Image: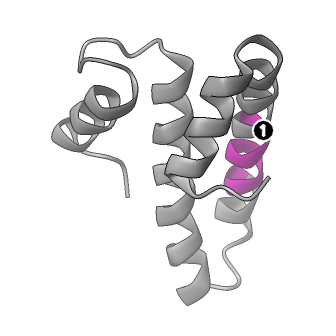
Amino acid sequence: MPLTKEKKATIFAEFGGKAENTGSIEGQIAMLTERISSISKHLQANKKDFSTNRGLMQLVGQRKRLLAYMQKHNLTGYRELIAKLGIRK
């Protein structure tokens, strides 16, 4: 299920500074985390949905690359973000 405009705006407002700042790394990571959690819930109910599983793996890889970039360029922000999102790392 795709994210609504209102949900995206609240995510970017909380993590990116303001709702229009959709290019911020923090906001993109938070949005990917929200999508990953919703797709994970879908896959728990539909275990044989392999195409969705592939899409989930792609999102996890994209989030991993963004987290690596953020860790390289802004270590304190990276640590705050993973603590706020509850990502194990």
Q: Is residue 18 above or below residue 88?
A: above
Residue in view at x 70 percent, y 16 percent: 74
Say which of 71 and 34 sits in front.
Answer: 71
Say which of 51 and 6 sits in front.
Answer: 6
Q: Is residue 39 above or below residue 67?
A: below
Q: Is residue 48 above or below residue 56?
A: below
Whether residue 29 sits left or right of residue 21 in the image: it is right
Picture colour scheme:
one colour
Residue picked out by circle 1: 64
Q: Position of residue 71 (x, y in %)?
A: 78, 25
Q: Position of residue 4 (x, y in %)?
A: 23, 44
Q: Position of residue 12 (x, y in %)?
A: 33, 28
Instruction: Indicate the secondary structure of the residue bearing disc 1.
Output: helix
Say which of 33 and 72 sits in front.
Answer: 72
Residue in view at x 32 percent, y 47 percent: 3
Disc 1 residue crowd, few under 14, some 14–19, many 20+, Cα 10 Å: few
Residue in view at x 30 percent, y 33 percent: 14
Q: Position of residue 16 (x, y in %)?
A: 38, 21
* Kind of residue at badge 1: Lys
Whether residue 18 sits left or right of residue 78 in the image: it is left
Whether residue 3 sits left or right of residue 57 in the image: it is left
By secondary structure, the bulk of the magenta-drawn segment is best described as helix
Residue found at the far left of this picture: 6
Whether residue 40 sits left or right of residue 54 in the image: it is left
The stretch drawn in magenta includes residue 35: no
Q: Is residue 52 above or below residue 83?
A: below
Say which of 58 and 10 sits in front.
Answer: 10
In terms of image quadrants, where is residue 1?
Answer: bottom left
Magenta residue span: 55-62
